[in-house]
Amino acid sequence: MIFPQVELAPADPILGLTDAFKADTRTEKVNLGVGIYKDESGSTPILKSVKLAEEKILATENSKSYLGIEGVQAYNRVVQELLFGAEHRVVKNKRALTAQAPGGTGSLRVAAEFLVRNTESKTIWVSNPTWANHQNIFKSASLAIEQYRYYNAQTHGKDFDAMLADLSQAKAGDLVLLHGCCHNPTGIDLNESEWQRIAELCLKQELVPLFDFAYQGFGVGITEDAQGLRIVADTVPELLIANSFSKNFGLYNERIGAVTLVADTETTVAKAFSQVKSTIRGNYSNPPAHGALIVSTILADAELKTLWESELKEMRERIAKMRTLFVESLKAEGVTQDFSFISRQNGMFSFSGLTKEQVTQLKEEHAVYIVGSGRISVAGMTRDNMPVICKAIAKVLA
Ligand code: PMP
């Protein structure tokens, strides 16, 4: 027998928490672990723009035949427009090719496997800290992982000098994972001049940026959030982007994202992209259609696009309100530490600075679930659960 030798895998640091939460029988429990948007009533609704697009798709769809390896063509075009803007040089000069892929995770995995199989790039630099699944994805694709410093625990801010210093140790051809916006887990992003410095460093040292872009529109706005990516694409000859529509279209379980390859010429990108397709073929052959049809239907229809933009704005603004309310409510509960840095962070998460012990205490004594790193999903906070959360945090800090 072979299966008895298989060791029990440790629970996933984020999804394992959801399992524990579901099994918890306490009534006032709150799950702020996984990054899922909740509205004021605590539910994760289907966007109106998505429902309307689905009605259109149902009425017109006439086949369930296979898609091509790279997925829905119209979808791949709109992905590039969202990433770069329709007028960007990379798009105009046909230096980018996009393949639909299963979510941000699937896109990262395809990108990593393509790189390992076809290039000399075998090492990827990721920020410390980063999204817990990055290590898992890149290890599964046999990439070696190095870390660059990013966060300063004392100031609750970024440590840009340390980031530059660490990346200056990277060798030509090494990959650098960059969070396009709404850095997960810290919520701290680079500003325009810092992006410029990173782009120049990548150019000078011949590093290849791999953008993880899972939160476009959750930071400042759809275009503003792409600033870093566009600066880098303006500067370096080659890069990759793994983007996801799980959050900004609320299409979590449709598993919809894309991997985009940018090369220095149209010919090079076409050649390299043939290997991206070969990687996909060897993994899942070709992607499912529904999520891509939803996104391309919305973005091709001016009315649906405007509706989606307003729904995305509403999500972004609700999270920002929760950040402010969280900081105020902690104060009202008598917490004396300064948590104002939380209102300066971007995206779904707040990196609270709570210790592992405090996180355990929150879960065991107060049924408030957050990730062991102290990352809190602000997107899961509502006016109703805020008092429970802040009272619990005040108690563990006392
Ligand atoms: N990258 C980051 C930084 C994320 O936070 C997430 C989702 N939590 C993903 C990628 C993956 O997204 P998806 O669910 O589309 O695979």
Image (cartoon, rainbow, N blue to C red):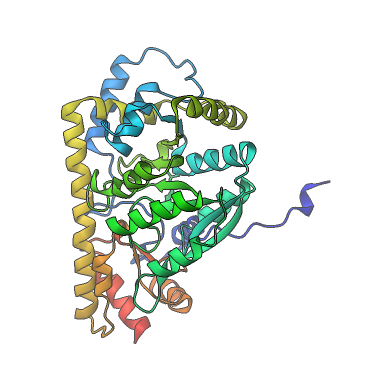
Classify the position of the C terminus by image quarter. bottom left
**Is residue 185 placed above or below 181 in the rendered structure?**
below
The x and y percentages for residue 385 are 26, 65
Residue 235 placement (x, y as % from top left): 37, 45
Q: Is residue 265 left or right of residue 59?
A: right
The quarter of the displayed image where residue 370 is located: bottom left
On screen, residue 17 above or below 85: below
Residue 188 visible, this angle: yes
Task: Give the x, y percent position of residue 118.
Answer: 62, 36
| Of residues 45 and 167, the one drawn nearer to the viewer in this rendering | 167
Identify which residue is drawn at 21% across, 80% down: 331
Q: Residue furthest top?
A: 62
The relative height of residue 62 versus residue 367 in the rendered view (above or below) is above
* In the displayed structure image, the side of residue 263 where residue 320 appears, left or right: left
Q: Does 344 appear above or below 36?
A: below
Question: Looking at the image, how many numbered discs can be counted on the residues?
Answer: 0
Residue for point 64% across, 48% down: 142
Residue at far right of view: 1
Q: Which quadrant of the figure has residue 396?
A: bottom left
Name the foreground residue: 205 vs 145.
Answer: 205
Residue 341 spot, x, y in % from top left: 27, 72
136 with respect to 312 (left or right) = right
Work out whether residue 170 or residue 341 is closer to the camera in this orientation and state it.
Answer: 170
Please tell me which residue is depicted at 47% across the width and 67% down the height of the picture.
165
Residue 371 visible? The answer is no
